[in-house]
Amino acid sequence: MKIVLLFTVFIFNSCFKVDTVDRKTEERTYKKEEKSVVSKPKVVVTTSIIYDTVLNIAGGAVELTAIMPPGVDPHIYTPTKSDLLSIARADLVIYNGLYLEGKMSEVFLKLEERGRNVVSIASFIDKSNFIEPKNFPGQYDPHIWMDPNIWLLSFEGIANKLGELVESKRAFFIESANNYRRKVEALSEEVEKKISTIPEKQRVLITSHDAFEYYGRRFGIETIGIQGISTVTEAGVGDIKRIVNIIIERNLKAIFFETTVPKRYVVSVIERVGAMGHSLKIGGELLSDSLAPKGKQGDTYIGMIRYNTDTIVNALK
Ligand SMILES: [Zn+2]
């Protein structure tokens, strides 16, 4: 592009009076600079996890906004009028995809069809990496950030997309994405080492909903959720019974809350297990579909995976 532009200027300079062209070129350059100072491109993302990831790649080169604040459950989030307005005004929208954003998924798919600059993180990752849950045939588990080695596969795609918006920063985005990828790779190795300190028999993670399948597959820990991969469907008596039986049969010691999911199902499991003379402790509160609020442990993507790992290791070891 630059080469073409330089070449065009060269042709102009050769054919017309130099002073006229120079003034025009100056005006063009000025307008371009003025525009870039006044407004950065607006990038709107859905979850706090995507926000932190994109921020690590974009730096301050774009105006970045997340629709869902920390602590919000993306499966059941209904967009407000102001969310829809900021989506409409955005130069680029990045969402997770694989129906994580339950109620918003259709909106994004329609916008994509209409040719708007809307893209999912999942579209940057080869489908062969995704888990197909038995209970939801034909669907992929959307919790792809839980395996750092899968999540980092999207960084290059994000950088390229940002590069289309701010061409002058293309190299910077690619470099940031590479640096961030190395940090996330190191995180993955750190988690692997920590999880390996839990005795194999105790490597079972029971949570409110199935958000940790990717984490479990990557780090060798069995995962059991009371609800399925989405929190849209309520858990029934049968689900609670199934979990209680597994806990008693296998003499499991801990169960975990999640910050984005109501505690009632976990509490109900603890009560039933207790009534059967088995004590089950609360392993802590995990960050599944959202980061922690700013200033708390787990308020970045890397911090979140580390916080979850430390909580799991402390409870199960
Ligand atoms: Zn979830």
Image: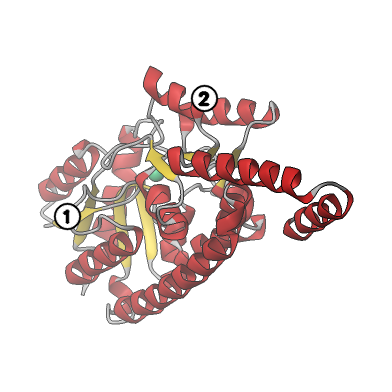
Residue 38 as seen in the image, left or right of residue 200: right
Tell which of 35 and 13 is nearer to you: 13
Tag shown at residue 48: none
Tell which of 19 and 236 is nearer to you: 19
Disc 2 crowd rating (10 Å Cα; few below 14, some 14-19, many 20+) is: some
Q: Position of residue 316 (x, y in %)?
A: 22, 69
Q: Secondary structure at mark 2?
A: helix
Amino acid type, callout 1: Lys
Q: Secondary structure at mark 1?
A: loop
Tell me if residue 45 can be seen: no
Quarter occupied by residue 263 = top left
Whole-number angstrom distance, CA of label 2 to CA of label 1: 32 Å
Tell me if residue 29 can be seen: yes
Residue at horizontal 17 percent and vertical 55 percent from the top: 296
Residue at horizontal 21 percent and vertical 47 percent from the top: 293
Tag shown at residue 296: 1
Q: How is the image coloured?
A: secondary structure
| Residue to which mark 2 is pinned | 88
Disc 1: residue Cβ within 8 A of ligand 1's nearest atom: no
Quarter occupied by residue 85 = top left
State ligand 1's quadrant: top left
Q: Position of residue 259 (x, y in %)?
A: 23, 45
Please identify the quadrant where the C terminus is shown.
bottom left
Q: Look at the numbered discs 2 and 1 and tell me whether their residues touch, using CB distance below 8 Å.
A: no
Amino acid type, callout 2: Ala
Q: Position of residue 297 (x, y in %)?
A: 19, 59
